Image (spheres, rainbow, N blue to C red):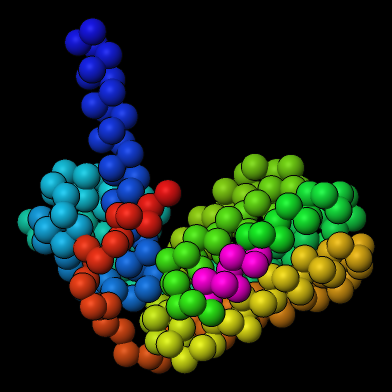
Amino acid sequence: MGDLKQHSLIKAQERLRDQVGHALRAALIAGELRPGSVYSAPGLAAELGVSATPVREAMLDLAREGLVEPVRNKGFRITEVSERDLDQYTELRTMIEVPTIGRITKIATPEQLEALRPIAEEIVTSAREHNLIGYLEADRRFHLTLLGLAGNDRLVETVGDLRKRSRLYGLTGLDEAGKLVSSAEEHLELLDLMLTGDAEAAEACMTRHLGHVRSLWAQGRDKPVGRTPGGLGSGALGSAG
């Protein structure tokens, strides 16, 4: 029985680590953690209401993804992404995702595509309700699930990694200005085009969508970035799924 209890404890610790990682990624994307700034595990743990251990473990996970870098005896520095980096990430995503969308348009069944409509609608609803974390999570699920219809797991992993590295800065400011809704609605437009079987039009829509996302990055970097009221502890772990 002792071994079983230990196994259960390990699983619980892993889940908390994943939850903390999710909360930190959301804070990075929302601009609550500033690029170039150094944060300590104990300080972040206090805001999240957890011990420093899962925060330190989660930050090491983020370091392996290139989102943060360890600073000896201080904590972790949020890595900065240059305009050149963002342009290259967009180019890679365009090279991968656009032709893949065209191929999926030709091979996916209407049932497979329609199954994504609730997620696309969730993206729009989240944008309209200023639910930033909900928007980001639904957007991630839509794109990766859609790409998964191509049947290439490594492709999905690669795009998932590019999405993490090309996180949005200052998205909160854009949300408040209502500029996310038009981008959100493009997911429904893409889905409708794919359902018609028009691969060329679907590819054009995807190209435009990625260009729109890149312009949001540029605008987001021009916005002042700050923490939302309540800091990281304001429901961050509760949103981890």
Rendered residue at 82%/49% (across/down)? 111
Residue 173: x, y in percent?
A: 40, 87
> Horizontal placement of 35 versus 158: left or right?
left
The structure residue drawn at horizontal position 86% and vertical position 53%, both measured from the top left corner, is 110
Q: Is residue 153 above or below residue 110?
A: above
Chain part drawn in magenta: 120-127
Residue at left offset 82%, top offset 68%: 192
Q: Residue furthest top?
A: 1
Q: Is residue 131 above or below residue 152?
A: below
Lateral position of residue 2 relative to residue 195, left or right: left
Which quarter of the figure is the N terminus placed in? top left
| 124 drawn magenta | yes
Residue 23 visible in the picture: yes
Residue 211 location, x and y as percent? 65, 80
Q: Is residue 139 magenta?
A: no
Q: In which quarter of the view is residue 138 placed?
A: bottom right
Image coordinates for residue 75, horizontal then vertical, percent: 15, 59
Q: Is residue 47 left or right of residue 8?
A: left
> 187 left or right of 15?
right
- Residue 185 vs 221, above or below: the answer is above
Q: Nearer the viewer, residue 159 or 10?
A: 10
Q: Give how far across and how far down residue 4 sits, in percent.
A: 27, 14
Q: Residue at (32%, 90%) from the top-left corner?
A: 224
Main SS type for the magenta part? helix
Q: How many marks?
A: 0
Instruction: Look at the image and tell me whether residue 22 can be seen.
Output: no
- Quadrant location of residue 225? bottom left
Q: Quadrant of residue 239?
A: bottom left
